[in-house]
Amino acid sequence: MPSLFCLINTLFYLFFCVILYSNFELYVLIITTYIHFFMTNLLALLTFLFLSLIIYLIYKIQLDRNKFQSRIQVLEDFIVQISKEQQLQNNQLKLSEELKKKLIDINSVLNKDIYDLNFGLVEELYSKQWMYHNIFFNNYIIVRI
């Protein structure tokens, strides 16, 4: 702030010198000093603004990166959970297929055993019926003779 105040005082002093003395070289000196001061300050101000903008953008990028990372972490956790559930379902499906194969094997063995049992029972009933029939027929013949 003091440099600005000193510059303004210098400019007023030079301006009044020009008005009083009408010296063209002094007038050019005033204008160049004025332009130099404001261009330097403008350059400093623009540099400060661009640096501030760069720092803000870096900060904003870091915040967005952290937010993105947290969202990615949530998605990764969700994917891990889904993959575990899928693995459990695959294991259950394997067990289901194995049980289905075992049931088919057991069912075929059970069907064979039931068939053999029924066949044995039918043979036994048939042989007993044939035997009773023969006994009855033979007795009938013996009694008639």
Image: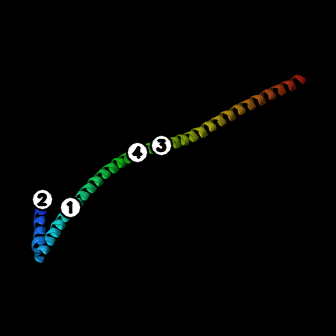
Judged from the image, the secondary structure of the residue bearing numbered disc 4 is helix
| Mark 3 touches mark 4? (CB < 8 Å) | no
- Label 2 and label 1: CA atoms lie apart by 17 Å
- Label 2 and label 4: CA atoms lie apart by 64 Å
| Mark 4 touches mark 1? (CB < 8 Å) | no
Label number found at residue 17: none
* Disc number lying in front (2 or 4): 2
Q: Identify the amino acid type marked 4.
A: Phe
Does label 3 or label 1 sit earlier along the sequence?
1
Extreme residue toward the top, this view: 143
Name the residue that disc number 3 marks.
Answer: 89
Q: Residues within 10 Å of mark 4 (few under 14, many from 20)?
A: few
Label number found at residue 78: 4
- Percent coordinates x, y for residue 65 in the rendering: 31, 52
- Label 3 and label 2: CA atoms lie apart by 80 Å
- Percent coordinates x, y for residue 119 in the rendering: 69, 35
- Percent coordinates x, y for residue 97 in the rendering: 53, 43
Extreme residue toward the bottom, this view: 24
Name the residue that disc number 1 marks.
Answer: 45
